[in-house]
Image (cartoon, rainbow, N blue to C red):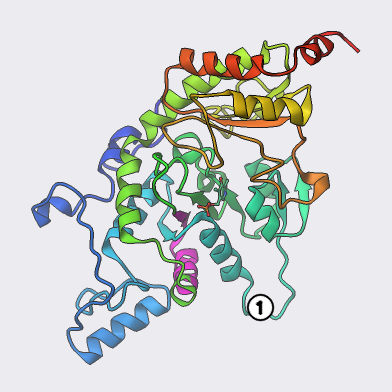
Amino acid sequence: MSFDLRRTDGLRGDSVAVHSGRQDLRDLGVHALPIDLSTTNPLPDIERGGDSYESMALGGHPLADGGHVYARLWNPTVARFESALAELEHAEAAVAFASGMAAVTATILARCAGTTRRPHVVAVRPLYGGTDHLLASGLLGVDIAGIVAQADGVPVQVDNTFATPVLQNPLTLGATMSLHSATKYLGGHGDVVGGVVACDEETAAALRRVRAVTGGLLHPLGAYLLHRGLQTLPVRMRAQQATAQQVADWLAAHPAVERVHYPGVDPDPRALLGRQLRGPGAMVSFTLYDGFRAAEALTSGVRLFTHAVSLGGVDSLVQHPAALTHRPVEPTARPSAGLVRLSIGLEDVADLIADLDRGLAAVPAERLELAATPG
Ligand SMILES: *Cc1c(COP(=O)(O)O)cnc(C)c1O
């Protein structure tokens, strides 16, 4: 699988991931990304500083001769990460936030605040637990292009956190916004919290206005780490995905496992492979026959997998969504008690499978036999 992106200058996806957002570094005489930690900036004079301020407060860019004025309005380290991510997402622009949830909140505020009509958001489950908590209504089982067709001009937002720009570009399928919890795959090392929305320039201006007044800023050190993470994103995704497919195949043959939910083995999402998704990704969930007890035995029996929420890093994680990430979701939409979620990292697949084998060995044996008996 090669990363499906070809820049106008002919550069291919993997190369764009390494070089995007860095075009001005050579002129600056530096090789690594500079980190600008200024919270305020010297003003050239009142008029030009004021004009630049107004441009940014309205959601635009700083004026070339007016300066950045204040860090809540603009930061060059953050802006570089935004332009790199926009390229990877085939988008005109991107706006980064302090977290994925700050990004989700801004997209909703930007659309709904100040309208006299009652705001109406339609969301498709399953959603990230926090987002589900934030919203109210649901609708099931439609793909991106299908939703865009049904939406009939209403802006469509896709949470692209699990797929990443390497596997799926919602904007090319007609979506208005592609949102990421950058905390996950974009950062890739579990050491930075951030969010980013790729979109057209008009939407970006609305999001920057919300960001400027609500203050959900991405810190420049976070932008530095996220921008660096983009360089290895395609390679990480390919390696983690290849391992995830093997783990999913192994789980599908295990007698304690009722069903594996992974686009590489599950016939439902599999239909989107090739059409919408360029690969099945590296998130694998599965249901254990013995429910909560089995999930508890597994999460406490593994050693190489860390029992922890979050995902998308170089190390593998295991968690129980019903008790943790999806706890705030209303009971009818909550995952089942036997569902366990894996985020597959960069470890050797044989070690990961051995670890799961050890974890599943702790699942009560009589249930294994029961589960293996039809009926
Ligand atoms: C983690 C996550 C979020 C929220 O992002 P934070 O960075 O934790 O605020 C939103 N959507 C998805 C799919 C996520 O995994």
* 111 drawn magenta: no
| Quadrant position of the N terminus in the picture | top left
Residue sitting at x 53%, y 42%: 310
* 202 drawn magenta: yes
The reply to whether residue 1 is visible in this rendering is no
The reply to whether residue 119 is visible in this rendering is yes
User: Residue 78: image x %, image y %?
Assistant: 33, 59
| Quadrant position of the C terminus in the picture | top right
Displayed quadrant of residue 233: top left
User: Residue 48: image x %, image y %?
Assistant: 23, 86
Amino acid type of the residue that numbered disc 1 sits on in the rendered structure = Thr
Residue sitting at x 55%, y 55%: 176
Where 335 sits versus 211, above or below?
A: above
183 vs 8, nearest the viewer? 183
Where 76 sits versus 295, above or below?
A: below
Helix, strand or loop at disc 1? loop
Residue sitting at x 42%, y 78%: 58
* In this rendering, position of residue 207 left or right of residue 271: left
Q: Residues within 10 Å of mark 1 (few under 14, many from 20)?
A: few
User: Residue 92: image x %, image y %?
Assistant: 41, 56
* In this rendering, position of residue 174 left or right of residue 43: right
Q: From which residue to which does the magenta span run? A: 194-210
User: Residue 29: image x %, image y %?
Assistant: 8, 53
Displayed quadrant of residue 194: bottom left
* In this rendering, position of residue 88 left or right of residue 112: left
Q: Is mark 1 within 8 Å of ligand 1?
A: no
* In this rendering, position of residue 303 left or right of residue 287: left
Residue labelled with disc 1: 115
